Amino acid sequence: PGDIDTGDLLVKAIEENVAFVRGDAFFADGQGTHSMRLNFSYTTEDLIAEGVRRLGRVIRDQMELSRALGI
């Protein structure tokens, strides 16, 4: 969702042993703070599924926190 800053999200994702590249790394004008780039190359389907599960949990937790705070 557009209200989640992927810079904040990355810290929480790393705590779950999953990572991504923040979207703003791919924009020359500073946009992309609410997007991310994922890489699925050179890994197994099982590890991809586990990484997506972990990342999904982190995103869901962040969305719940945002809702609770009224952000």
Image: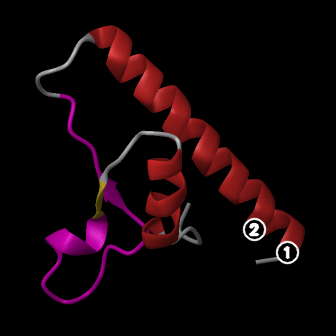
Where does residue 7 sit, x and y in percent of width and height?
A: 43, 71
Name the image quarter holding residue 49. Answer: top left
Q: Which residues are magenta?
A: 23-40
To which residue does mark 2 refer? 66
Q: Secondary structure at mark 2?
A: helix
Q: Would you place residue 61 above or below residue 50 in this image? A: below
The foreground one among 48 and 29 is 48
Q: Would you place residue 58 above or below residue 43 in this image? A: below
User: Marks 1 and 2, Cα distance to the nearest angstrom?
Assistant: 5 Å
Amino acid, disc 2: Ser
Magenta highlight on residue 29: yes
Q: Residue at x 56, y 68 (%)?
A: 4
Where does residue 36 sit, x and y in percent of width and height?
A: 33, 57
Q: Secondary structure at mark 1?
A: helix
Q: Residue at x 21, y 29 (%)?
A: 40
Q: Residue furthest bottom?
A: 29
Name the image quarter holding residue 41. Answer: top left
Q: Would you place residue 26 above or below residue 50 in this image? A: below
Name the image quarter holding residue 71. Answer: bottom right
Question: Quick check: marks 1 and 2 in contact, CB under 8 Å?
Answer: yes
Where residue 43 is drawn, which disc sits there? none
- Image side of residue 3 versus residue 64, left or right: left
In this figure, which colouring scheme has been used for the structure?
secondary structure
- Image side of residue 44 versus residue 57, left or right: left
- In terms of secondary structure, what is the magenta stretch mainly? loop
Q: Would you place residue 38 above or below residue 48 in this image? A: below
Q: Residue at x 19, y 19 (%)?
A: 43
Quadrant, the N terminus = bottom right
To which residue does mark 1 refer? 69
